[in-house]
Image (cartoon, helix red, strand yellow):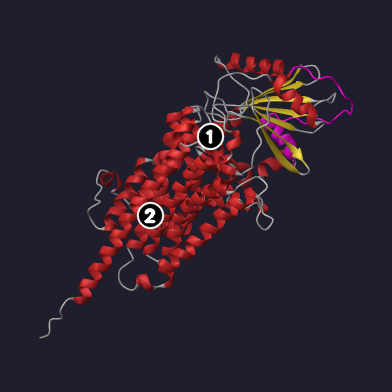
């Protein structure tokens, strides 16, 4: 078991850290989106909006389209987002939901477009390889947890013992055990539910057998999706507000409390066969996601379908809700964030303990040890540094039309992430033990720079953001500044420790030789 624990850790830990880090940030992906796209910054409000007054002029202007998606404002995303296919790509536009004014500004992949997909696909699209890699790592995490409980048989007793004044190897193992046990249910829950969420990728054969390889009937059975062909005849559309209210009334009658639509799909708007589907994907008071949908004939407002998930789909939606935590519960959201950070510490200390256990004798001079040491630095502090560079580049780009070598602003942010992350591995291989303190110092400087650049480019320093009710912006800046202070403090401590080690080694070399 110990051998399997060590082997699995060496094989999976670097990318597992990336999954946990990006997943932890994704807990607050909507808040990071507001920080990275200042034009979408609106104070949250409980006011209801009129789709007839705000949305209809916009969709009428777009003209006949097979699909238009309306993402209605919520507490965590106060703007109204409209998405549709345009010239082969999916375009997103943002609007003030109470005035209808378009919120224009520089686009960015931000957290929902880059950080969140990185968490489960690593942005590797070819043959769904990224999803398979994430599934393999999730299985590896379950193996690590199972074997770790056996390998560290005294883990429960040692949970109550943290010895920071002992040897670095001992204190590293204590921290590894403590962070493993504190959030053990969370560490099991996330990879397990992740495997359930993407079951159709890992086990496509049952759906292929039942539905002949067709995805449309599968989605109709699971999600209540309906497709319709355009009639080619224009028709007057019924009231969107009335249709949404009718759907919400049905849901509220079933649940016993107010239920709101959050995604509305318009199919062939303006056509005689047009459909409007109101979907409740993220219920505010329920764990389960994507539970119900009501489809209307857009020209008459009559209900065409009232879909409610079957029991097996409800179970899947509940597991998905546990993983994505999109329901309104801020304390639990912060607990998820803290547990994700503990998972990052658990993985990093596991790698460190492996290195410390082999730093005596000839092992540190072998290529394998040096490669593992550089990988440990690059996959932990290097990844955090690359994330900070991603945020700095977002605020440093001067305007929407800015390009470098044909790369637009959103691409430049991704390139900044990729270049800094790649460079961190090279830096770790060259600087060896010094790389830890130097990369921590760089993290502190980058994080502080991101917060300062946000202030300079938008005027929303923490006090101004709080005064304007932009609590998402305030929270991101506060976390950046706290992270900067923590990283600089860790860098200073590591630097002092490195100097102390050099002095000890120098004194040992200079000690008199006993000549007898």
Q: Does 146 appear above or below 91?
A: below
* Residue 232, image quadrant: top right
Instruction: Between label 2 and label 1, give the one nearer the viewer.
Output: 2
User: Is residue 134 found left or right of 17 in the rendered image?
Assistant: right
Q: Main secondary structure of the magenta part?
A: loop
Q: Is residue 144 visible?
A: yes
Numbered label attached to residue 350: 2
Q: Is residue 271 above or below residue 156?
A: above
Q: CA distance from mark 2 to mark 1?
A: 28 Å
Residue at mark 1: 319
Quarter of the figure that contains the N terminus:
bottom left
Please state, as top left, top right, bottom left or bottom right, where the C terminus lies in the image.
Answer: bottom left
Is there any visible trace of residue 213 in the rendered image?
Answer: no
**Which residue is pictured at 77% across the width and 40% down the height?**
86
> Residue 313 at x, y = what percent?
61, 31
Where does the magenta region start and end? Answer: 213-239
Secondary element at tag 1: helix
Residue 219 position (above or below residue 386): above
Left or right for 86, reference 23:
right
Looking at the image, residue 31 lies above or below residue 246: below
């Amino acid at each position: 078991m110990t051998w399997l624990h060590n082997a699995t850790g060496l094989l999976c830990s670097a990318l597992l850290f990336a999954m946990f880090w990006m997943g932890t940030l994704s807990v607050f992906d909507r808040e990071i989106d507001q920080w990275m796209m200042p034009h979408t910054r609106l104070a949250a409000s409980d006011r209801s909006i009129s789709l007839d007054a705000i949305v209809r002029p916009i969709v009428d202007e777009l003209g006949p389209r097979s699909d238009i998606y309306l993402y209605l404002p919520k507490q965590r995303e106060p703007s109204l987002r409209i998405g549709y296919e345009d010239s082969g790509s999916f375009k997103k536009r943002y609007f003030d939901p109470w005035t209808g004014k378009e919120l224009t500004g520089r686009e960015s992949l931000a957290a929902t477009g880059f950080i969140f997909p990185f968490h489960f696909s690593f942005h590797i699209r070819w043959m769904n390889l990224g999803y398979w890699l994430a599934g393999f790592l999730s299985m590896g995490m379950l193996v690590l947890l199972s074997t770790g409980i056996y390998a560290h048989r005294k883990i429960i007793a040692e949970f109550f013992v943290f010895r920071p004044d002992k040897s670095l190897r001992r204190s590293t193992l204590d921290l590894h055990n403590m962070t493993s046990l504190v959030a053990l249910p969370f560490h099991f829950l996330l990879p397990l539910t992740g495997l359930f969420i993407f079951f159709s990728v890992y086990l496509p054969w049952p759906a292929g057998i039942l539905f002949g390889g067709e995805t449309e009937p599968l989605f109709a059975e699971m999600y209540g999706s309906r497709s319709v062909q355009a009639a080619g005849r224009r028709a007057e559309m019924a009231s969107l507000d009335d249709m949404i209210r009718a759907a919400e009334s049905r849901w509220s009658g079933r649940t016993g409390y107010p239920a709101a639509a959050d995604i509305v799909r318009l199919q062939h708007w303006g056509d005689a066969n047009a459909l409007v589907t109101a979907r409740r994907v993220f219920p505010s008071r329920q764990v389960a996601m994507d539970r119900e949908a009501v489809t209307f004939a857009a020209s008459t407002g009559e209900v065409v379908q009232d879909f409610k998930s079957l029991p097996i789909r409800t179970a899947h939606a509940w597991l998905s809700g546990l993983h994505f935590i999109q329901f309104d519960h801020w304390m639990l959201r912060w607990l998820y964030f803290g547990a994700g950070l503990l998972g990052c510490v658990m993985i990093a200390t596991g790698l460190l303990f492996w290195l410390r256990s082999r730093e005596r004798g000839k092992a540190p001079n072998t290529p394998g040890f040096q490669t593992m040491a550089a990988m440990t630095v690059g996959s932990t502090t290097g990844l955090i540094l690359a994330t900070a560079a991603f945020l700095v580049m977002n605020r440093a780009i001067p305007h929407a039309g800015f390009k470098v070598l044909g790369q637009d602003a959103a691409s430049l942010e991704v390139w900044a992430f990729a270049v800094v992350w790649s460079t961190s591995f090279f830096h770790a291989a060259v600087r060896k033990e010094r790389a830890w303190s130097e990369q921590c110092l760089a993290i502190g400087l980058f994080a502080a720079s991101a917060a300062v650049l946000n202030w300079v480019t938008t005027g929303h320093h923490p006090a101004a953001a709080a005064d304007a009710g932009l609590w998402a912006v305030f929270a991101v800046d506060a976390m950046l500044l706290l992270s900067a202070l923590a990283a600089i403090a860790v860098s200073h401590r590591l630097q002092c420790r490195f100097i102390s080690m050099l002095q000890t080694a120098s004194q040992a070399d200079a000690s008199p030789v006993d000549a007898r």
